[in-house]
């Protein structure tokens, strides 16, 4: 029997993490919280002016969710360091990025300071670390063709896993949820999924010897969430990119690699996703992905909500899987946001 605490509106809204416009608790953000019942928000450069402003924004958003009798919000930001860092000087320390994290000491320094700064402004999730690898090659020019060349840890897959796991554990012991990305690995790609759909032909055995190693390390470190990529891995799923793939999210990540935490998509507004939002949401739910990220204002957020509600209302299997996703998300929030 369906309990009042697991009603359709809440089950659906908690599957969404969204972006918004503005730097305070404005009408748009209030609607996302109270009406859509979103699980979380993502802050970008346009939402950030200063540490004081971000702290006020995060605090007021949480208080508003509480006043609506809703679960606490995941409040996330991309703070990798280097070229992807939304929080800037003078209020926040800027780091040179993952290629310059070469040992445990530098990993600890980055993670400890970043966690402290995030917590001070009531941000509770970092969409980091990047666990992609760039395969070793005799031709140095091949390395610099990778879209991720300025965002990955140096060295072997084992070294990437070691450094990434240390950052995950440091974040999380300091109260910041870590998100490992971009599963199952995009370091081999040369095209940008913000602009087009990259295609990768690497087979599973090759990926097991390389790309998947850092993610296995992250799973062993109890990473809070794993973000899927928008890459088409033709040897794993010839039809759907990872964010929409049952073969990758359910079969590979959950069943074969044993990950039982929260799985989320990358931003569904990227041009790599060539499907309409209804088709994408159907695939996300079928793949047992917990949360869809929709990071820009527009009808996609409302359309996604309506599609989730329709699917879990009319399909008993998707309803039961929706409860499982809801409990994974709620368990994560309970662990960090009490």
Image (spheres, rainbow, N blue to C red):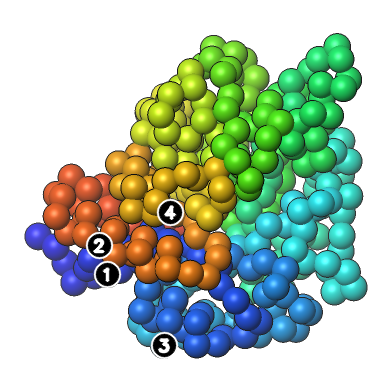
Q: CA distance from mark 2 to mark 3?
A: 23 Å
Secondary structure at badge 1 equals helix
User: Residue at coordinates 44% horizontally, 76% vertically from top-left?
Assistant: 32
Q: Are marks 1 and 2 in contact (CB under 8 Å)?
A: yes
Q: Position of residue 26 (x, y in %)?
A: 55, 87
Q: Are marks 2 and 3 in contact (CB under 8 Å)?
A: no
The residue identified by callout 3 is 67
Secondary structure at badge 3 equals helix
Mark nearest the camera among 2 and 3 is 2
Q: Are marks 4 and 1 in contact (CB under 8 Å)?
A: no
Mark nearest the camera among 1 and 2 is 2
Q: CA distance from mark 1 to mark 2?
A: 7 Å
The N terminus: image quadrant: bottom left
Mark earlier in primary sequence (1, 2): 1
Q: Position of residue 49 (x, y in %)?
A: 77, 79
The residue identified by callout 4 is 291
User: Residue at coordinates 76% horizontally, 53% vertically from top-left?
Assistant: 84
Residue 9 — which label?
1
């Amino acid at each position: 029997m369906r309990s009042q605490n697991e009603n359709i509106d809440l089950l659906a809204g908690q599957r969404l993490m969204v972006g918004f416009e503005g730097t305070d608790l404005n009408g748009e953000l209030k609607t996302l919280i109270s009406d859509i019942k979103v699980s979380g928000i993502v802050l970008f450069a346009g939402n950030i002016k200063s540490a004081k402003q971000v702290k006020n924004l995060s605090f007021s958003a949480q208080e508003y969710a509480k006043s609506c009798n809703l679960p606490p919000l995941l409040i996330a930001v991309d703070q990798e360091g280097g070229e992807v860092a939304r929080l800037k000087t003078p209020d926040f320390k800027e780091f040179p990025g993952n290629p310059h994290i070469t040992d445990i000491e530098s990993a600890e320094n980055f993670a400890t300071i970043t966690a402290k700064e995030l917590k001070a402004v009531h941000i509770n999730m970092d969409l980091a670390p990047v666990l992609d690898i760039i395969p070793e090659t005799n031709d140095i020019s091949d390395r610099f063709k990778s879209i991720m060349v300025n965002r990955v840890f140096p060295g072997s897959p084992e070294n990437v896993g070691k450094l990434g796991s240390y950052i995950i554990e440091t974040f999380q012991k300091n109260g910041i949820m870590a998100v490992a990305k971009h599963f199952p690995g995009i370091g081999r790609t040369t095209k940008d999924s913000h602009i087009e759909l990259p295609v990768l032909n690497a087979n599973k055995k090759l990926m097991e010897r390389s790309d998947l190693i850092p993610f296995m390390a992250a799973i062993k470190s109890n990473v809070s969430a794993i973000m899927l990529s928008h890459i088409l891995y033709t040897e794993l799923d010839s039809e759907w990119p990872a964010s929409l793939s049952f073969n990758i999210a359910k079969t590979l990540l959950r069943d074969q690699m044993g990950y039982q935490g929260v799985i989320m998509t990358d931003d569904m507004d990227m041009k790599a996703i060539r499907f309409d939002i209804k088709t994408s949401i159907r695939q996300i739910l079928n793949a047992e992905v917990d949360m869809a990220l929709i990071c820009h204002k527009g009808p996609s957020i409302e359309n996604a909500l309506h599609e989730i509600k329709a699917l879990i209302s009319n399909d008993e299997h998707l309803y039961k899987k929706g409860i499982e996703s809801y409990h994974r998300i709620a368990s994560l929030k309970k662990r960090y946001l009490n």
